[in-house]
Amino acid sequence: MDLITAILLGIIQGITEFLPISSSGHLEIAKTILGDKSLPKESLLMTLILHGATALSTIVVFRKDIYEILSDLFKFKKNESFYFSLKILLSMIPAVFVGLFFEDLITKFFHQNILLVGLMLLFTAGLLYLANRAKATSKKIDFKNAFWIGVIQAIAILPGISRSGATIALGVLLGIDKNKAARFSFLMVIPLIFGSMAKSILEIDLHNTELDILSLSIGFISAFITGILACKWMIEWVKNSKLWYFSFYCLFVGLAAILYSVL
């Protein structure tokens, strides 16, 4: 992969990870347009590295929240931060299950499957539209809601379903306060992404896989920088209840992707 492609993919990942428009879907579309010839495992590795960069940008933006949560967790205080951590762990179970038992199937999806991306973008568009019409509440996340948000996060492994969009939208549809839903959505993915990265890196067959360290590094840096900016912007956007903008965007891109794949 050339460096320009790596930079562009990093920027796309950094912007789209925190906007509810599916970063993985946009990456697959971009790889097709840019003529990326990577094998499925190499393509998935680049996707994971870029997601790792935006996970790191999430840590930077929410560093105070994360420090508070971890401090209380290691002090074994049964307070709000302690129970929040348990909810994060609970939300990870569905995605871990899917990752462990359906890894080969997931890998095949990350090889420029534009028709699937288009269909899943339509699904994202519908979720965002419904969430935008939901009434604002001040409800907090309980353990039951944390599990169901985890289920939608597992489904959002499919390219084209926005992970942040799906989890925030479901949270809002469950009656959770939008700010709390966004905060939970951005924090819940951090351990999953780093876990997936570690697993993939450990399983790489260095003899049969082209490991382009320079391209991976350049992509990581560009995704990290743009991710910080996009994360801060998305938090403000959720507060202002403008999710329907992204709903129509996903609808347009989804239909365009389906038309492209059919023709």
Image (spheres, rainbow, N blue to C red):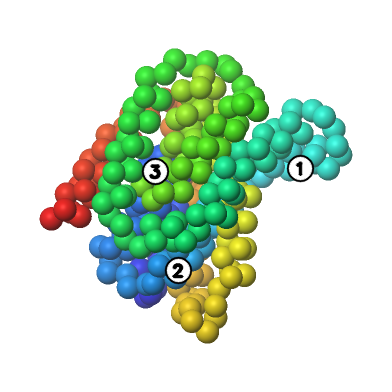
Residue at figure coordinates x 83%, y 43% from the top left:
74
Q: Mark 2 falls on what kind of element? A: helix
Q: Mark 1 falls on what kind of element? A: helix
For badge 2, the amino acid type reads Lys
- What number of labels is visible? 3
Point out the tag, 3 or 2, that comes first from the N-terminus.
Answer: 2
Residue 41: image tag? 2
Q: CA distance from mark 2 to mark 1?
A: 34 Å
Q: Residues within 10 Å of mark 2 (few under 14, many from 20)?
A: some
Image location of residue 54, percent across then percent down:
52, 53
Residue at figure coordinates x 39%, y 72% from the top left:
39
Nearest to viewer (mark 1 / mark 3): 3
Image location of residue 208, percent across then percent down:
48, 81
Residue at figure coordinates x 81%, y 37% from the top left:
72
Image location of residue 171, percent across then percent down:
51, 27
Residues at discs 3 and 2 in contact (Cβ within 8 Å): no
Mark 1 = which residue? Answer: 70
Point out the tag, 1 or 3, that comes first from the N-terminus.
Answer: 1
Mark 3 = which residue? Answer: 161
For badge 1, the amino acid type reads Leu
Nearest to viewer (mark 2 / mark 1): 2
